[in-house]
Amino acid sequence: MDKRTWLKAAAGLSFSMAACQLVISIWPAAAAYFQAPPSLLNDRVRLFVVGGSAALIPVLFGLYALSGAGVIRRLPLMRTALIGIGSLFLLRGLFIVLTFLKALGVLPGEVLLAGVASHVVFLSAGLAYLGGAVLNWNALKSR
């Protein structure tokens, strides 16, 4: 397997996150399912603007992954960005520990399927970014 595949997978996960965020921003029922605040649910334009803006963040992250994989031109601060993005996603994904503690009854609260899926996606993306950055470390040196 090519070492750049990790970063391509990271890009795919980021673009999938962005697509899901965009769906949430145009479909109020989906936004309600993911517990968007009532102020957004009652104002579709604001829901679209806020949700669409939020979708741009994983798009930018995906572009960094594609850049690190050599698919598009090199972006600035490549190594720093990939490690930062991977760490952010990994930390977000580690909230799955809290979900397990809720499932075991150690912590109060309900376990939502959407929450578990979200944790798994973020954990996978974090591992893909960090794995790709480590495996391609020398190739990511600034020129």
Image (tube, rainbow, N blue to C red):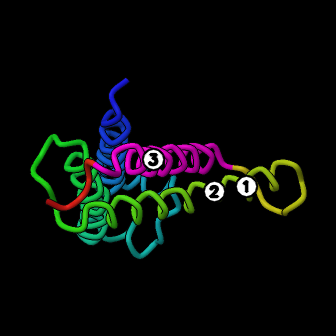
> What secondary structure do most residues of the magenta stretch adopt?
helix
Q: Nearer the viewer, residue 59 or 133?
A: 133
Q: CA distance from mark 2 to mark 1?
A: 6 Å
Contact (CB < 8 A) between labels 1 and 3? no
Residue in the image at 81% along x and 48% along y: 103
> Is 25 situated above or below 118?
below
Q: Position of residue 121 (x, y in %)?
A: 50, 44
Quadrant showing the C terminus: bottom left
Q: Residues within 10 Å of mark 1 (few under 14, many from 20)?
A: few
Which SS class for mark 2?
A: loop
Residue at the spot of label 3? 125
Task: Give the residue displayed 42% in from the left and 49% down from the top.
Answer: 134
Secondary structure category for the residue under label 1: helix
Q: Examine the rendered structure and indicate whether residue 60 appears above or below residue 62.
A: below
Q: Which residues are magenta?
A: 112-138
At which x and y percent is residue 19? 29, 46
**Residue occupying image coordinates x 35% and y 34%:** 3
Whether label 2 touches label 1, CB < 8 Å: yes
Quadrant assignment for the N terminus: top left
Q: Are marks 2 and 3 in contact (CB under 8 Å)?
A: no
Q: Amino acid at mark 3?
A: Ala
Instruction: Point out the tag, 1 or 3, that comes first from the N-terminus.
Output: 1
Query: In the rendering, which numbered label is found on residue 97?
Result: 1
